[in-house]
Amino acid sequence: MPFPVPSSGFSDDPADHDQPTSGDASATPPRRVPPGRVQKGPFVDQCVPGKYAWCRCSKSSQYPYCDGTHRGSEITPLKVVFEKPVTVVWCACGESCNKPYCDGSHGRL
Ligand code: FES
């Protein structure tokens, strides 16, 4: 399944990104809750168009989404933009060779 390629050049502030929230359920489709930790398997999400930041420091409480915990370190999130609704299979083990997307590398863990 093809996914949009990672892009760069965005603000490093997570507030600038369309992160999943627990907002009004009637206004948005129901979302799975991000695991909030590295896991042996991907995190699948129905993403609405917008900017997303994939956590590269593995310390986010919203992992695999960045929550800004990396601030003060050299690590920055990997940012992507979706122009249309898409089902995304995010890497949540941190071992994918196609970050931020799962490539099945978790199967070797
Ligand atoms: S919290 Fe931002 S990269 Fe991990």
Image (tube, rainbow, N blue to C red):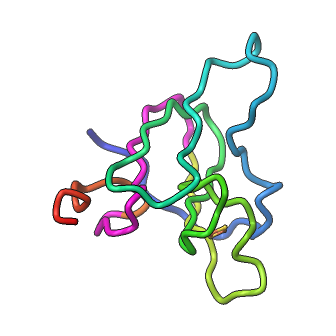
Residue at horizontal 36 percent and vertical 48 percent from the top: 42
Q: Please, is residue 19 above or below residue 75 in the view?
A: above
The residue depicted at 55 percent of the width and 34 percent of the height is: 47
Magenta span dominant secondary structure: loop
Query: What residue appears at the point 16 percent right and 64 percent down from the top-left corner?
Result: 108
**How far across and down, in percent of the image, does residue 12 sit?**
75, 70
Residue 27: x %, y % from top left: 76, 15
Locate residue 74: give its quadrant.
bottom right
Which stretch did the figure color magenta? 82-98
- Residue 86 within the segment the image draws in magenta: yes
In the current view of this chain or complex, which residue is farthest to the bottom? 74
Quadrant of the rendered structure where residue 105 is? bottom left
Identify the image quadrant of residue 103. bottom left
Q: Against 27, is 82 above or below? A: below
Residue 49: x %, y % from top left: 61, 35
Q: Position of residue 84 (x, y in %)?
A: 54, 31
Inspect the magenta stretch and tell me whether residue 85 lies in it.
yes
The answer to whether 43 is drawn above or below residue 102 in the figure is: above
